[in-house]
Image (tube, helix red, strand yellow):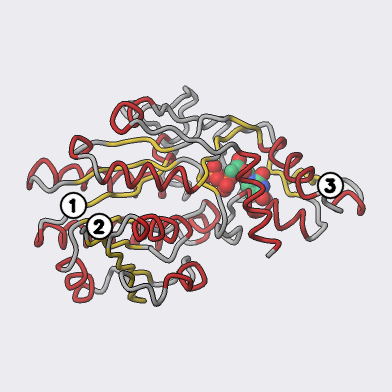
Amino acid sequence: MTRTLITGGAGFIGSHLAEALLSRGQHVTVIDDLSTGSLDNIRHLVGHERFRFAIETIGNEMVLDRLVSECDVIFHLAAAVGVQLIIQNPARTIETNVMGTEAVLKAALRYRAKVLVASTSEVYGKSERVPYSEGDDITLGPTSRSRWAYAASKMVDEFLALAYQREHDLPVVVFRLFNTVGPRQTGQYGMVIPRFVQQALAGQPLTVYGDGSQTRCFCNVRDAVRAIVGLSETPQAVGQVFNIGSTEEVSILEVAQRTLALTQSRSAAAGDPIRLVPYAEAYTEGFEDMLRRVPDINKIGRAIGWQPTIPLDETLQQVIEHYRS
Ligand code: UDP
C-alpha cells in the first residue's frame, strides 16, 4: 500500500486528488496552511481511517521532514495560485513557489520519496503558437510586470525538480496543469468559471474581460486527477514534463453564454446579462492576457494512455450544482 503526502491537499485539486488516492486504497496525508485551501474541501474525508491532515505551512521544516519521512510519494501542489492573487501578492507568490518546492525536494531527497511537482500552463508564457508542447521554447514578458513572476517561479520549480532527478537520481515527475475546473473551485482568486456560475446564480451580469474572444480549454478536475495518479504510477514518467489539459477550445464569451443558458439565469432581467470589462480595470494597466491556450496532450497519451473524457457542459453542470447546494 502506498503512503502518499499531498502538499496543498485542502485546495481544489488537492482535495479531489486525496479522494482518488483513498479510493485506490492508499494512505493519504495532507499538509495545507489554508492560505487558499479550505477545511470545507476535506471535511468529508476527516475520520477516514487512511486519511490524516496537518494544518501547517510547508515552510515548517520539522513538520515537513516528519511527514515526508512517513511517505513514499509526494504530490506537491502547495503554491500561490490564480492570476489575481499573483498580481496582488507578487512577493508571496515567488517565495511560496520557489522556497516551498525547494523545501519539499530537499526533504524528499533525505528519504528518497518520489515527487510529483505541479506546474502550470502559465510557463508557456505569451507564445501564440498553439497547441503548446512540453519541449517548446518559452517567451515571458518583462520582470516589471508581476504577472510573469508566476510563470518564472514555476519554471524555477521545474528546473529544480529536474535537477534533483539528474544530479541525485531522485524520482520526480513534473506536470503542467492547464485550466482545470470542477466542484469546490473558488472564484475568489479570479478563476473564471466559478465566478461566472456564482454571478449567474445571483442574477448579476457576467464579467467578461476584454472582448471575450480569448479562448481556453477547460479540463474537468476528475480527468486531471486521473492523469496525475496515472503519472505517479508509471515508472517511465520519471524525469519528464507532461501537459494535462483538455483540447476542447472555447471562447470566454461562449463560456459566459453557456453558463447563462445552463443556469437559466435571471442576469438578463437587470439589462445586459454580460458586462465587458476592460483588462486594465479587471487586472492592472498593461495586463497581457493569452489569446489562446491549448495543450498538446500527445505525450501523456503515449505515456499512460490518458485523454480527457468529460465535456465542458457536464463540468459546468457540476459546478452549478455545487454552488446551488
Ligand atoms: N476572465 C473573465 N472574467 C472573469 C475572470 C476571468 O473574462 O471574471 C477571463 C480571463 O481574462 C482569462 C480567462 O477568463 O482570459 C480565464 O481566466 P482564469 O483566471 O480562470 O485562468 P487563466 O487562463 O487566466 O489562468
The crowd level at tag 2 (other Cα within 10 Å; few <14, some 14-19, many 20+) is: many
Q: Amino acid at mark 3?
A: Pro
Residue 173 seen in this snapshot = yes
Q: Nearer the viewer, mark 3 or mark 1?
A: 1
Cβ of disc 3 within 8 Å of ligand 1? no
Residue projecting furthest to the top: 129
Residue 279 seen in this snapshot = no
Spot occupied by residue 173 in the image (x, y as percentages of width and height): 24, 43
- The answer to which of marks 3 and 2 sits earlier in the sequence is 2
Q: Amino acid at mark 2?
A: Ile
Q: Amino acid at mark 1?
A: Lys
- Location of residue 111 by image quarter: bottom left
Asked whether, in this view, residue 178 is left or right of residue 72, the answer is right
111 in relation to 273, above or below? below
Disc 2 element: strand
Q: Which residue is mark 3?
A: 273
Report the Cα–Cα distance between label 3 and label 1.
Answer: 48 Å
* Front residue of 185 and 188: 185
Asked whether, in this view, residue 17 is left or right of residue 157, the answer is right
Q: Nearer the viewer, mark 3 or mark 2?
A: 2
Q: Which residue is mark 1?
A: 114
Disc 1 element: strand
81 in relation to 243, above or below? below
- The answer to which of marks 3 and 1 sits earlier in the sequence is 1
Report the Cα–Cα distance between label 3 and label 2.
Answer: 44 Å
Q: Residue at x 52, y 32 (%)?
A: 293
Do the CB atoms of the residues marked 1 and 2 lie less than 8 Å apart? yes
- The answer to which of marks 1 and 2 sits earlier in the sequence is 2
Q: Which residue is mark 2?
A: 74
